[in-house]
Image (cartoon, rainbow, N blue to C red):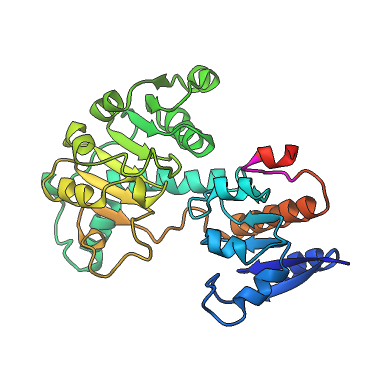
Amino acid sequence: MKKNIMVMGRLSASQQEELAQYFTLLEHSGSLDLTQPGVAEVLSKAHGIIGSGLPVTPELLDAAPALEVISTVSVGYDSIPVDELTKRGIMLCNTPDVLTETTADIGFALIMAAGRRMIELAEVVKQGKWTSSIGPDLFANDVHGKTLGMVGFGRIGAAIARRGALGFGMPILYSNASPKPELEKELGAKRCELETLLAESDYVCITVPLTQETEKLIGKHEFSLMKPSAVFVNIARGKVVDEAALIEALENDTIRAAGLDVFEQEPLPASSPLPHMHNVVALPHIASATHETRQAMAQRAVDNIRLALQGERPINVVNETVLNE
């Protein structure tokens, strides 16, 4: 008898056909809300769940007694209780690697756009206000040769730093739980304490995962340590930053500008001042949003769930202790 996969979100026709060769697909277009009609019934049959932005709860897991694996089409999994899955022997797979370079492109694009005031000055042209040569009040700051501070130095952080060091001659500082000697050799990067990084960097870029330890890692105190000319970029998770403190720092010129792809609440509420601030470049969480990368992420998730349910080792496993049980 074929095992059942609950498909949440979009897979291409070829990816669905691939899975259908081995499994029965239980398609569900709504949310994983147990109060919605039909959700509990579908969950009760599922051996695997594949999708993105999956809000997994212990109650949901109780409704899925046959569940063996969750395959998320993302790198991050902050909405999934990993310890609870591990306790129940349920495997969690994610999709690192395939989105590293695309996400790093957006990270460095935000550095460039916020640093050189591109969006702000493009609006000057759009609004017909470019009537003479701009003066110093609209000048920006250089990017090349300036110090780039990476808070988090995993795959994506390293890829952004590589663009800065090798392409723009930027000295690299990094704050990370563990040293990265190979990257230090390759990029001339220097590991330092977070406070030193914040004080010495011209551009501060956040790429850490969201955990209990990193939630609101950057707040009022941290912004106060930065240079008044500093540009702050966040492509990690919105909750890594105290958003109220960020707004205050931007309003008070504690820092000069920010480039943001993530926010505490998404979609960003209309009441938020951030997209209306002249010194903010705000994007709708698009770091991995290209046709090629989203296709590759979905395929990696497909490969992970297929291998897991066939009793083989998936390419990417978050809670590897489950493999030993």
Q: Nearer the viewer, residue 118 or 239?
A: 239
Q: Give the range drawn in magenta.
A: 314-319
Residue 95 seen in the current view? no
Q: Which residue is drawn at 29% across and 52% down?
A: 118
Q: Which residue is drawn at 39% across and 38% down?
A: 213
130 vs 287: above or below: below
Question: In the image, residue 18 lies at what x, y percent?
Answer: 80, 64
Q: Any magenta on residue 316?
A: yes
Q: Which of 206 and 30 is in front in this view?
A: 30
194 vs 220: above or below: above
Q: Quadrant of residue 316?
A: top right
| Quadrant location, the N terminus | bottom right
Q: Which residue is drawn at 60% across and 44% down?
A: 96
Q: In this view, does 149 lie to the left or right of 302?
A: left
| Quadrant location, the C terminus | top right
Residue at the extreme right: 1
Question: In the image, residue 129 lies at what x, y percent?
Answer: 16, 64
Q: In this view, does 17 lie to the left or right of 246?
A: right
Q: Any magenta on residue 75?
A: no
Q: Is residue 267 left or right of residue 43?
A: left
